[in-house]
Amino acid sequence: MKSKVVTAIILAFCVTSVVKAEWKQNGKVVPDTPWAKSAGDFGAQVVFTDKPDDLFSTWEKPGPVVVYSQTTTAKRGVPIVAVIFFVGCTPDDHGQCNAVVRFTAFTPDGKPWGEAVDAELWVGKPPPQKGQMQLSVGNMGIVIDPDDPLGTYKVKAEVVDKDAKKTILLERTFTAIEAEPK
């Protein structure tokens, strides 16, 4: 079901276009879920958007809030994108983060779907300041093709902070449905 993020990642803008945020809902810290977890100061969550260009362009604009279209439904032939929001990567000896993500998708019957996607979370960049949320550099595009089965797919994201030697395993599902007739 497509919805504007009600738990809108409330973000306070910072001059460097990195934003401050916490995973809170109604003023309380949200506990770990299969799709949003933390390991100490390092935290990550995986979300699907059906309007990635809007998310990416909005993320770069100054402002107090980033509101984007989040979905858990993929219509046949219509792309959605899995992205990672994260906080707290550990800098190396040169003050740079080395964090990556590996996305793996599975069909409704649990079989691997396509090749795993290795992507940059945040590599060779200074870490976001404490408590600041950042959007991953890399992502995973998803399109349900004509021969793909309909049903509930699972995407796993293995998020690794190489310098802190911390790994967060996330998983989230989406439902593939037939597109509306034109």
Image (cartoon, rainbow, N blue to C red):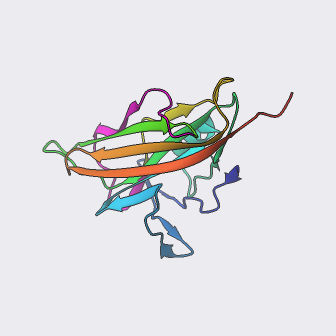
Q: Position of residue 144 (x, y in %)?
A: 64, 30
Q: Position of residue 135 (x, y in %)?
A: 45, 45
Is 51 in front, or is 157? Answer: 157
The residue under the point 49% across, 76% down is: 28
Q: Position of residue 132 (x, y in %)?
A: 39, 57
Query: Is residue 19 located in the magenta-colored stretch of the structure?
Result: no
Name which quarter of the figure residue 158 lies in. Answer: top left
User: What is the total number of numbered labels drawn onto the structure image?
Assistant: 0
Q: Position of residue 96 (x, y in %)?
A: 23, 42
The span picked out in magenta is: 109-133
Taking the image as drawn, is residue 22 in sight? Answer: yes
Question: Given the current orientation, which residue lies at the most extreme right position?
Answer: 182
Query: Is residue 112 located in the magenta-colored stretch of the structure?
Result: yes
In this picture, residue 7 sits left or right of residue 181:
left
Taking the image as drawn, is residue 46 in sight? Answer: no
Residue 170 lies, with reference to residue 52, above or below; the image says: below
Residue 129 lies, with reference to residue 102, above or below; the image says: below
In this picture, residue 94 sits left or right of residue 115:
left
The residue under the point 63% across, 56% down is: 5
The residue under the point 58% across, 40% down is: 108
Residue 147 lies, with reference to residue 172, above or below; the image says: above
Q: Quadrant of the C terminus?
A: top right
